[in-house]
Structure formats: structure tokens, C-alpha cells
Image (cartoon, rainbow, N blue to C red):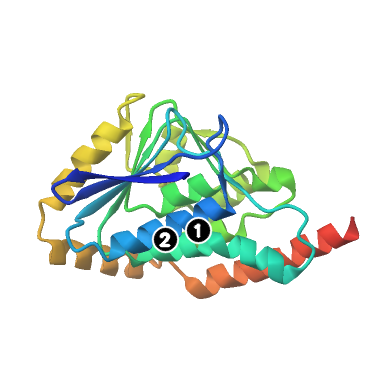
Amino acid sequence: MAIEIDAQGKGVSVITLAGHDAGNFVYTQDLLDLAAVLTTCASDKDLRALVITGRGNTFCGGRIGAKGLTRASEVAEDLNAILKVNSALNALSVPVIVAVEGQAFGFAFGITAQADYAIAAEDAVFSLPEMSHGLPPLIVFSYLFRFVPYKRAFELAVTSRQISAKEAADAGILTEIVATSTTLKRAIEVAYKMASFDPKALGLLRKFGREAAEVHSKPKSEHAVALMSVMLAERTAAH
């Protein structure tokens, strides 16, 4: 299974994205599995903080969608796996801390931006590579402007360029930068600190904060899927 979860004790658990190939890519079923794990975490009364990390020295090289889909409804179903992850992540009552080593591309870039607390290694790299494949990253755009100014986010998307951890932090995507190979250790430290607070107070802080910042917008993300699914289906049919 590409999604692993390990209880660390004292109310802290770690989800590991154990994806495919050297790039640690995730497929549609992996996203559905991740959404299911996050939903299970939401019902864990003992959970106080959740860490998400990647296998080895790569957080995640991004999502690989299903190929050859010719109907908009099929494309939408494939893309909806991302929405299920985002919804499950937002529905948690505990803070989510992300620990990024190596690459965080596409889907992983989005998870990092959405997290409540994001820690990256000093040599980590981030990218929205979708436009280089002819795919506008509209789902990420449904929330990215909560953290990154429009002109910077548009530039990152339209160029698909890779940025350093420092630039990601300056843009508002990261909370901390630490030495390489220490992100998980630091993330667990942060998680234990958060787990020591009153759970109701912490849950209220997270819920209100995300609502006030409008981190998650179901209508906007669903609209993004609708637009992308029609475009991709038309392109496939034309070929």
C-alpha cells in the first residue's frame, strides 16, 4: 500500500506517502487510500496532531492521472480523488504538519501549501509542473492564493519552474526550513508540542483559522474539476 500510517504515541501519528518509482509518485487509487486514511484519523478520539511525510528522501513527485479517458465524467471522477483528499484533510480537527525532503511537485506542492505547519529540508525543491504537460493546475489555484500573491502563483504555474525551500518560504508556503534529513524529527517535535495543548482549544483554533483564511472552498475546487475535465476530455477525443 502506498499510504502508511504509524502511531508515535502521545496522540501523534505519521502518515508516509510510500509512492511509486524513484519519484515517489502517487496514482488515483493512492489518493483514494490517503483520503480514507485521513477520514479514519478524523474519527480517532486519541489523535492530537498528524504528520505527513514521504518515503526516503523524496516527499512526493506528484500525481499521475489515469490515461486515455475520453469522457468528461471519467476525467472528473479521476480528478475528484484529489478533492477527496483535500476535503478529508480540511475536515480533521487536529493540526497537520508536513515534513518535506527532496521533491514536492504538483499534488505534493498543494498538500504542503494546505498544511497547517510545513517544514522542509534546506535543499528541498517545489514545483507546479502541470502546465509543462498542458494541464492548468486549477485545483491548486482554488486555494493557493490564500498563501501566495496572485502574480507569484501565476508565474510559478505558467513557468513550471522549480523553486528552492527559501523561495517557497518567502512565498508563504513553508513555516520552517531545517537541515536535510531532519524534517521528520522536527515535525514530530512540533506535533508533540501541539499535542500538549487542550485538544478542544487547538481544534477550534484550526477550524476557525482555516475558515477565516478560506483555505478550503468546495465550490471553487468542484468548479476547477469541471473546467479541467471538459478540457482534457476534448483533447483526448481530438487525438
Against 120, is 36 above or below? below
Name which residue lies at 21% across and 68% down: 204
Q: How far apart in space, not on screen, are marks 1 and 2 (Cα)?
A: 6 Å
Q: Could you tell me if the residues under marks 1 and 2 are in contact, i.e. CB atoms within 8 Å?
A: yes
Residue 37 location (% of width, % of height): 38, 57
**Viewer-closest of 36 and 141:** 36
Q: Amino acid at mark 2?
A: Ala
Q: Which residue is mark 1?
A: 32
Name the image quarter holding the C terminus. Answer: bottom right
Against 202, is 109 above or below? above
On the question of residue 142 being in view, the answer is: no
Q: Secondary structure at mark 1?
A: helix
Q: Secondary structure at mark 2?
A: helix
Q: Quadrant of residue 105?
A: top right
Against 14, is 123 above or below? above
Q: Is residue 115 left or right of residue 162?
A: left
Name which residue lies at 45% across and 50% down: 111
Residue 58 location (% of width, % of height): 47, 32
Q: Amino acid at mark 1?
A: Leu
Q: Which mark is residue 182?
A: none
Q: Is residue 128 left or right of residue 12?
A: right
Residue 227 location (% of width, % of height): 69, 68
On the question of residue 137 being in view, the answer is: yes
Name which residue lies at 45% across and 61% down: 86
**Viewer-closest of 199 and 156:** 199
Q: Which residue is mark 2?
A: 36
Q: Residue furthest front?
A: 1
